[in-house]
Amino acid sequence: MVSINCRSVIFQDIQAIIFDKDGTLEDSQEYLRNLGQKRARLIDARIPGIGEPLLMAFGINGNHINSTGLMAVGSRRENEIAAAAYIAETGRGWLESLTIVKEVFTEADQILPKSIPGSLFKGSLEVLKYLSQAGIKLGILSADNITAVQNFIKYYQLNDYIQIAMGVNDSPSKPDPELFLQACQKLGVKPVRALMVGDSPTDIEMGRKAGAAGCIGIYWGKAEANYLQGADVAIANLEEIKVF
């Protein structure tokens, strides 16, 4: 076990660190924004007038995506349910609304296939190597689907450092603490010996509810980080995680 220091906040006797993926290790904001816009346009083509409200629900405003919004932190299932709710407000039945959403989301995937993961944030690979060499067990716990998480690890050749890969295909989703507890079980550590690192309030809430040793928020240089106020410490880049 080691101690971790982040901006003078010390976490003692740490055995594992569990990372979020999108917005924490992977810079996927542009892809998520484009995908959300495409989904909204395709739905609007079927049901005119619903596109703009959907973009707001997704957390997309022009070229900006809210880092705490639905597209950024929600699972695919949660995005489907939110979109279907807007469609149902037009008088359509719930099953019909869900069917439309599933068809549109599949069409959007075909138009914008994520064949290549977004880029790793600068310094992330070096930090993962550094932590792994220090004897810390590492895992990824994402709201993205498990296939996307596995592809991300394979593409960036992280298998030597990442010991577990978890995603959300159905439920539960973040901030359900059961996900963090499952990750700790797979790593063979107690939650009180594991840290959660993420870029959204849902990551922090999940870690808190699961009894994590601590929660580190990351904002990658964004001017405002008030949304991470629930974290023990908020950092601008992963290189601020130091072993001592």
Image: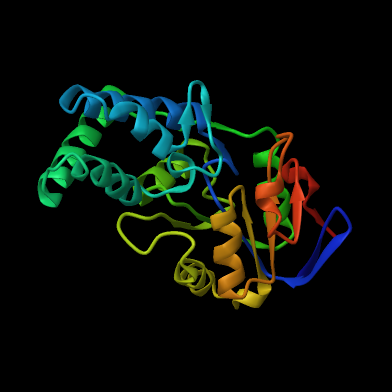
Q: Is residue 12 visible?
A: yes
The residue lying toward the viewer, choosing from 86 and 225, is 86
Pick the front one: 52 or 69: 52
Q: Which residue occupies 75% across, 51% down?
A: 234
The residue sitting at the right extreme is 8
How does the figure colour the protein chain or chains? Answer: rainbow
Q: Residue at x 20, y 22 (%)?
A: 45
Rendering quarter of residue 125: top right
Q: Quadrant of the N terminus?
A: bottom right
Looking at the image, which residue is at 70% across and 47% down?
226
Q: Quadrant of the C terminus?
A: bottom right
Q: Position of residue 169 (x, y in %)?
A: 32, 54
> In this rendering, is residue 107 above or below 174?
above
Task: Left or right? Give the position of 91 relative to 227.
Answer: left
Asked if residue 235 lies left or right of residue 152, the reply is: right
Q: Residue 228 appears at what percent x and percent y?
A: 67, 52
Q: Position of residue 109 (x, y in %)?
A: 27, 31
Q: How many marks?
A: 0
Whether residue 139 appears in this view of the structure is no
Q: Please state which of residues 224 and 210 is positioned toward the viewer in this rendering.
A: 224
Q: Residue at x 23, y 44 (%)?
A: 84
Q: Along the horizontal axis of the image, is 106 left or right of 164?
A: left
Would you say 65 lies left or right of 169 here?
Answer: right
| Residue closest to the eye, 122 or 87 | 87
Q: Is residue 67 above or below residue 179?
A: above
The image quarter in which residue 170 lies: bottom left
Query: Horizontal and vertical percent for residue 9?
Result: 84, 61
